Image (cartoon, helix red, strand yellow):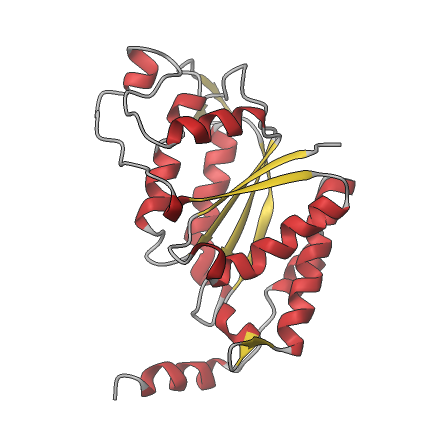
Amino acid sequence: MLKKIVAINGSPSAEKGNTEMLLAPFLRGMENAGAETETLYVDKLNIKPCTCGRMYCWYNEPGKCCISDDMNMVYSKLQQAEILVLATPVFIPLPGKMQDAINRLCPLLTPFIEFYNGRTRIKFRNDVSIQKIVLVATGDWWEKENLELVVHIAKEFAEKSAVEFSGAVLRPHASRMKSQGVLSEAGLSIQTATEKAGADLIKTGFISGELLDEISRPLILEEDLRNRYNSFFK
């Protein structure tokens, strides 16, 4: 059983955002199944963009970033994590600091490349324990498909790093989980399903498609949501 989980929450709203509304019950389910979890909020960290432009962490000093900031602490925690949870709201497509954090994960990867199944691949360094990557993503447009680009990014990163992509927990029109600022009955039901998804991932190693569908199910008609948005700009 994998028991050490680190989540990176890329929301600019940190623990007050819609992403946390999904991430918190997901991690709670993991904890109830016996795992230890920790959440890192990129908005509270000093994470600079990757600016060296020379792949210093591969060619000059493998495994070491040439930038000194809070990513050094992130590296230390991720080395011990068995599951990495990438949690983010979807803008177009990612919040800037979340993209910076993902770009800066390069020092955790070995520069030695392999080629299989028609693709060039690398691996996490031997001192990195990550075995699975899972995505938690929220958006405020109606359709789940609006989150697919972020799913591709997370899945490609996992496969490129030769670890398992354990699935995507997706919540479109996430703000509809609340009514007048309070979780609705439907919102609470989705959180319950999300908590079960976290527990199942720890207990069984996977999340069922039926459960993922329950988490991302529509809460409002597309036309009604569109009209609500457009009314702000009339």
Viewed as shown, does residue 115 lie left or right of 48? right
Tally of numbered discs: 0
Q: Is residue 225 visible?
A: yes
Residue at image position (22%, 20%) is 54
Q: Nearer the viewer, residue 114 or 204?
A: 204
Which quarter of the figure has residue 60? top left
Q: Position of residue 219 (x, y in %)?
A: 57, 77
Q: Position of residue 225 (x, y in %)?
A: 45, 81
Q: Quadrant of the C terminus?
A: bottom left
Q: Is residue 207 visible?
A: no
Q: Is residue 8 above or below residue 68?
A: below
Residue at image position (55%, 61%) is 21
Q: Quadrant of the N terminus?
A: top right
Which quarter of the figure has residue 206? top right
Q: Position of residue 120 (x, y in %)?
A: 42, 24
Q: Is residue 131 above or below residue 144?
A: above
Q: Position of residue 99 (x, y in %)?
A: 35, 43
Residue at image position (76%, 40%) is 34
Q: Nearer the viewer, residue 176 or 123?
A: 176
Q: Is residue 172 above or below residue 166?
A: below
Which quarter of the figure has residue 85? top right
